Image (cartoon, coloured by chain):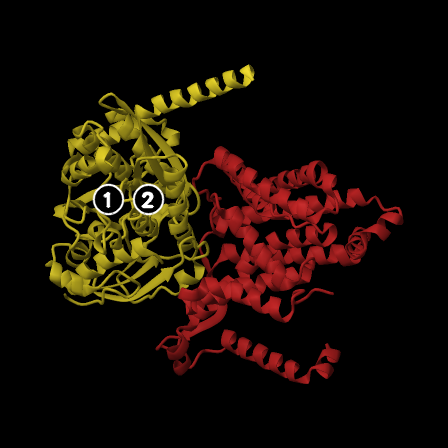
Amino acid sequence: MSKCSVGLLALSSFFLSTAAIAQEKIKVGVTATLEGTYTVLGEDGMRGHQTALNVLGKKVGDKELEFIVASTDATPDSAVRAVRKLIEQDKVQILLSPLSGDEGIAVKNFAKTHPELTFINAASGAQETTYVDPAPNFFRYNMDGAQWQVGLGKYAFEEKKYRKIATVGEDYSFIYTQVFGLVLEFCGAGGQVTNRQWVPLGTKDFASVIAALPDDVDAIYLGLGGADAVNFLNQYQQAGGKAHLMGGSIMIDQTILSSKGNAKNALVGTIAASGQADTWEDPGWQKFVKAYQDAFPPNKRFPSPSLLATNYYDSTMALILALRQVNGDLSNNQAKYKEALAKIEIDAPNGKIKLDSNRQAIGTNFVTEVVDDGKGALFSKVVKVIPNVNQTLGYDPAVFSKIGLPSRTVPECKKY
Amino acid sequence: MSRFVERHPAWALISIIAIAVGLWLVFAVWPPGLEEAIGRKRVFLNAVFNGITLGGLYFLVASGFTLIFGLMRNVNLAHGSLYLFGGYVGYAISTATGSWLLSFIVAFILTALVGVLLQLIVFRRMEGQDLRQTMVTIGLSIVFADLMLWACGGDFYQIQTPNWLIGPIELPLVTAIKSSGEPVYLRYPLVRLVIFAASVVIGVAMWLALNRTRAGMIIRAGVDDRDILAATGVRIQLVFVAVFALGAGLAGIAGVVGGTFQSLSPGEDIRFLLASLVVVIVGGMGSIPGAALGALIIGLAEQLGSVYIPTYAIVVTFLIMVLVLAIRPQGLLARR
């Protein structure tokens, strides 16, 4: 009997002590695509996240941030499963999630079932996530896929004199959004998009897709990412492809530009647009690149951070800075914290970022061109910097809403 | 053949017509009306060739799978891991030595060794317990996947195609006639043709070994009845180990092939496991000609599907599997 009560006492004091420790910590759940086609993107996202922690530290007042990482595979159900696990099992209070487009839409919808918690988007870029029926507790500090294409259509039409293009893209929301941004601007300038091909995420064999590419176009736009992009380029080289290329934001990115093998050389000279440019001279950007390079040994990172690293860096930065503004106060269903997040303007390495009324980022976009640095490494070089890009891409919101939501066939190729 | 015609005259007629139409589509210059209806001939021919070469790769993976199943009744769900392992080994060897051919040999030997260890350490202990073996192989595939992720990271690896195989060649198939009357020939990646030829050679060699040698006779006898074979004095355990090594080695070779014309990354193991499952279900579990036919059908369905009905391409493969399961559940070429 006495033995039993001693045991109980010990047990209860153990629980009490863990509860006491838990009070001083703020738990944050992070998801990244550490499996499947987008593994490399998830890994570099986590590097960006780690870089932000190195720069900013984990302390908020007298509390310490604790990060718990869960893995997803770019499918919406994997993201919801990971987020649910983080909330129910690990009891996180804030989420930094997710990475990929379809995941973003699913997590946004899931966020509505937990209005007391705060969701900060890590890197996903589908338009629908914050444009259609946004969740009041979901904040996105990166631009969406369409914003990331601003400037590309005009540059292709006016400077490169492309008149007819065809697109090949992965068949999911983020790439729909990217093609949406491209088509609006390119067709608005007077260009023609003759053919849009969609391939399932995770396609390995592109040979038939490559054979079906039209010959009578000035350039082919590639909206692919991760393993798909590498496979496409490899098989494109084997098939002897020679067309001019244009790239989406995760196609012309260090995740692809520093992949092994020589298939990526087909990309030299390719024009693209994204929320960052590898060789931007801005001191803030250069400082971030340096911090990223110093944080990891050269064989464990890319020569320069990818778009995902930058996005994870920015969203981690917003998460910590806003939390410091309210001194770690998460009482009253995190009301003060959410208010701070909505108002905060961060001086991110890739330009200033603030949120609109849907809690969607307004930021800076870059038109780039791929160059070889002379030693075989490829980088995206800045061609044009476009500040203050908002979600309606400068269109009047009423006009913008008439275009429709990004999909396989929307928008039509015409001037809106 | 003649018996088939006598017994099923209608089916025979339909298949002869289908073959004739297929040959005409490949060799004839398409009239403009047809090009308008279903697209350019170049696209069609490319899709057909891609389907056949992809089928070659699927055959390499699935033949080992089906061989192991046929003899040992062991559904080895870690087969995809062997594929990926072979690919990584091939990548390491080809970057270290620069020799593409050497990477095949080393990948074959090392994956075969892994297969031998699996058979000796794991499967021998649970012989005849199908469900337990299946569960163990699922567990092993997860462990292997994590070990490989740990060792190689999530990066994409591509095995360098040797210089003499890079680029397309012209095939003597006319895809169109220019307005000047000059014929346009089909250009096709050389590396895929070589890989297809190699898988045909391997397939034929396997068929010959199974049907014309003493060792093949023992394996075939084992497929029919293990117990009687063991009772005749054959050292059945040795046969099991040898077959497992061969099946695993083939998966390793397929890994090198896959790493050359596609890429290697985590997740590929599951994809190829699924592909070989579908292939052997369509072709018939345990049958080598079945694996060949199944691989061809699935490869063609994937590629033609991705060109002509891109939205539903993924469904086509599984639709075929469902149809086969509904009409001929034992598989197209299964014996029983």
Q: Is residue A334 visible?
A: yes
Q: How many numbered marks appear?
A: 2
Q: Nearer the viewer, residue A178 or B172?
A: A178
- Residue occupying image coordinates x 66% and y 62%: B284
Spot the residue most to the front: A1
> For residue A198, what is the image quadrant?
bottom left
Which corner quadrant holds the N terminus of chain A?
Answer: top right
Subunit of mark 1?
A: A
Tag of residue A99:
2
**Image coordinates for residue A110, horizontal then vertical, percent:** 32, 49
Instruction: Confirm or deny contact between disc 2 and disc 1 (CB under 8 A).
Output: no
Under circle 1, the secondary element is loop
The span from disc 2 to disc 1 (Cα, nearest Å) is 17 Å
Which image quarter is the C terminus of chain A in?
Answer: bottom left
Residue B54 percent location from the top left of the image: 53, 58
Q: Nearer the viewer, mark 2 or mark 1?
A: 1
Q: Position of residue A250 (x, y in %)?
A: 31, 47
- Earlier residue among tags 2 and 1: 2
Q: Which mark is residue A137?
A: 1
Instruction: Please tell me which residue lies in front, A186 or B286.
Output: B286
Q: Is residue A127 left or right of residue A170?
A: left
Which chain is in yellow here? A
> Looking at the colours in the rendered structure, which chain would you say is drawn in red?
B
**Residue at (12, 58) in percent of width and height:** A397
Taking the spot 39% from the left edge, 39% from the top edge, the residue there is A88
Label 2 resides on the chain identified as A
